[in-house]
Image (cartoon, helix red, strand yellow):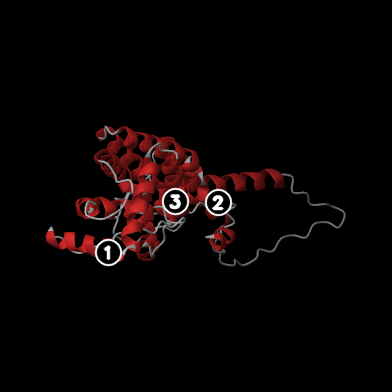
Amino acid sequence: MIAEANILRVRHAVCLAHALNLIVKKAMDATRGLDNIRSKTRRLITYFKSSTTAKEKLQQIQVQMGRPVTKLIIEEVDTRWNSTYEMLQRFYEQRDAAAAALTTLPTDLDLLTANDFECASECMKILSPFHAATVELSHEKRVSGSKIIPLVKMLKHALSELMAQNSNKMAKHLGINLNRIMNDKLSGIETTSIFSLSSLLDPRYKTLGFQSPSNAESAVHRLKSECAALLRNAPTEEDPPSTPTAQPEPAASSQVIDLWKLLDRDAEEARVSRNATADAIVEVQHYLSAPPLERSQDPLVYWTTNKALYFIF
């Protein structure tokens, strides 16, 4: 990412996967009561992992309940917030078997209450879009810079819908924290040239990925300006050489002054600039008016195949 930013002469390029990790970790830490549930879960899983008797008892209960023998997950990696999500999810899935095993084992550990499990379940629902986004980004093998703006839009939309459906106080608080921190960390994404132009030039998204119509309009205006600049600086085909016409030689004492040189030059530059701007507008509108690609398609293949359609791009 750093090398890519240097090549593109970008001062700072956000890594969305890293940003999501920080956002979710801060939101979870700021949610009252959630840390207590995480601590209880870690201690209980550690007990099952470190005690052979407890581990065998859990496996025995799982078999008796007709469930597959599944190991609990304890690792919480600081750089992978979703390791916490996976730990809570696995323990929630095995809650009945774990509770049944613990009743027969000599331990004074604090057990998770029914309310704890309910809060954990509702919080995981709120976190589920962020988990899906993190998994998708980690598996990305193609260009992903153009995906940042639409992915943030989809995260905010999903979070809004899940919060509207959720009545759990802890989950609501978590959702509020996520929304607040995400707005703080990612507020300038849509106005950053490298991300706005890459999203606009991805035929899967174009202007559809923007939350703000004004930001989308600004990105289109920026693209037209970039294209016009390319057209103005593009080399033109030289006119075929013509046979020079013999001109009478001026008298030695006379001086030839091109009185209109400055005005003619400025007028020519204005014509070239106007033509470049008009051509850029037509080209960009032509591209934007075409239907978007399906999201499963590769935008790089699209541009390789269709580059002849757009003389600017």
Left or right placement of residue 11 versus residue 70 in this view:
right
Q: Report the residue that reaches farthest toward the right.
A: 253
**Is tag 2's residue or tag 1's residue first in the polypeptide sequence?**
1
Taking the spot 52% from the left edge, 54% from the top edge, the residue there is 231
Residue 51 appears at what percent x and percent y? Answer: 32, 63
Disc 2: which residue? 229
The amino acid marked with disc number 3 is Asn
Q: 158 or 142: which is nearer to us? A: 158
Residue 174 appears at what percent x and percent y? Answer: 37, 38
Label 2: how many residues lie within 10 Å, few (<14), some (14-19) or many (20+)?
some
Residue 124 appears at what percent x and percent y? Answer: 30, 45
Taking the spot 30% from the left edge, 48% from the top edge, the residue there is 128
- Under circle 3, the secondary element is helix
Disc 1: which residue? 53
Disc 3: which residue? 21
**Is tag 1's residue or tag 3's residue first in the polypeptide sequence?**
3
- Under circle 1, the secondary element is helix
Instruction: Give the foreground label among 2 and 3.
Output: 3
Count of numbered circles on the image: 3
Taking the spot 59% from the left edge, 60% from the top edge, the residue there is 6
Left or right placement of residue 287 versus residue 26 in this view:
left
- Under circle 2, the secondary element is helix
Confirm whether residue 241 shows in the render: yes
Q: Report the residue that reaches farthest toward the front.
A: 106
